[in-house]
Amino acid sequence: MSLYHVPPPQEVEPFSALQATRRRLTLWLAGLSSIACMLVWWYDGSNGLNSPWAATAVPIIAAGLVLGGLVIWFRPLWHNQAAALCNASVATYFIGSLISTTEAGGAGGLYEVASNAQFMPLLYLAAFVTMTRGAARLSWLTYAATAMSYLWLYGFDGAPGGDPIGHFWFMLLITHPIFILALSYVSVLHTRLKSAEVEVHTSRERFLAMLSHEIRTPLQGMLGSIDLLDLRVHGGGERRAVDRLRQIANQLTAHLRDLTEYTRMDNPAWRLQPEWIDLAGLVEDICDEHLPRLRAKGLNLQVEVSEAPELREVELDPQRVRQVLDNLLNNALKYTPSGQITVTLGPRPGPAGDDARQLQLEVIDTGVGIAADAMPCIFEPYVRLEDRKLPRTEGSGLGLAVVRRLVDRLGGQMAVESSPDRGSRFVVWLPARATAIPSDTPVGAESGEQTGPQ
């Protein structure tokens, strides 16, 4: 048997993932822009096209872009400020270059003014792509500084007729507001669409929460009545009927929980709540909670938890880790008619020198197994495999789909190894520390003000 690595779900990224994508894009833009600046500076210098301003300012701007990228890399929460600083420094270079080359005149001045007039719209685009807020304000400030520079150079009378450099200035001042307005419109439209999407998901969650409450209330009453009825029955047939009623009620409760959680994760505003936890203790507690059900079915449970100290100090969302292990154990219990279920937890060391430690969680059963062609299907929502050796399988078909989404949101990966009649082995790899969430909220707000091991 070989491990089948489960691909991540194809779904809308949550806000934290979108922010991480924006951060990676900003890093690439800063790095590539600094390289491009130095290449153009070298080429123009070798051809005698660099003005005194460009000869001095371009290396400084390139170094500033590299510095901004380093700030974003090591301090993700400073992303917007670093991106604004990078964009503002490049804008300063463009405006200074326009002024210096206009004063110098000649063919070199005409070349630089024309080049800057063409490239400045890319500056506006970079601001809207890399900044989470304030891009429109920075773009309009850049344009205002450009207009003031034109007035300082030519006055209110404007450039004299037949001046090619003045012509480029005029075209710049006329066309650039169109770029800024278009980008502002697209940005506002994107924000409104995202808000509408969040509102749709929130409304659906609200409806499901209300429906779940309305169903759970009578369910709890029914379970209480079943427990009272169980005290009064004596015959084997009556007790089996009561047990069947209890099983149906518990099954409906589990369906509601899975459906609510799966739907909640569709919301782009869904967030993790990482905190410092004892992962080894959490896994042992979850296994203890499942022990009575396994014993009732005649199954053995073996728990193997490594003594590695890093398992006692992990920054993860405990509720989501619990959901992952709960669903994996429920799945193993469902498809294992006899034998044993084994849960293992230990460190998964990465390459030498790699600080991104991973943890490995396994759930192994001796159940009916899974055919190779069914592997890609079992993690899809509402898919439930049937087996002739088992009575009709109960469940909503959402358990493994929820696991797949949660593992992806936790920044981990998972794989499964199985064959018919030999059991299954589900492997989950999780980072030993949650990925930093760059956002506009204060430090600590995402994790309940937890800033270290407690």
Image (cartoon, grey):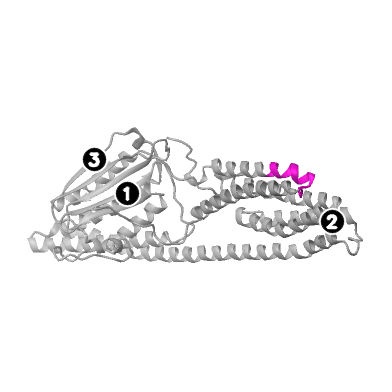
Q: Is disc 1 surrounded by few (<14), some (14 to 19) or many (20+) residues within 10 Å?
A: many
Badge 2 amino acid? Tyr
Residue drawn at point x = 36 percent, y = 35 percent: 310
Tell me which label, 2 or 1, sits earlier in the chain. Answer: 2
Q: Main secondary structure of the magenta part?
A: helix
Q: Secondary structure at mark 3?
A: strand
Say whether residue 51 is magenta: yes
Q: Is residue 442 visible?
A: no
Viewer-proximal residue among 114 and 5: 114
Badge 1 amino acid? Val
**What residue sits right under mark 1 in the picture?**
428
Query: How many marks can you see?
Result: 3
Q: Is disc 2 surrounded by few (<14), some (14 to 19) or many (20+) residues within 10 Å?
A: many
Place of residue 28 in the rendered image (x, y in percent of width and height, measured from the top left): 56, 50
Viewer-proximal residue among 307 and 254: 307
Badge number at residue 304: 3
**What residue sits right under mark 2 in the picture?**
150
Distance from disc 2 to disc 3, alpha carbons, whole Å, reads 74 Å
Q: Is residue 294 left or right of residue 440?
A: left
Place of residue 159 in the rendered image (x, y in percent of width and height, measured from the top left): 89, 60
Say whether residue 346 is magenta: no
Q: Is residue 266 left or right of residue 168?
A: left
Asked if 290 appears above or below 240 in the picture, the reply is above
Viewer-proximal residue among 325 and 126: 126
Distance from disc 2 to disc 1, alpha carbons, whole Å, reads 61 Å
- Which quadrant: the C terminus? top left
Tell me which label, 1 or 3, sits earlier in the chain. Answer: 3
Q: Which residues are magenta?
A: 48-61
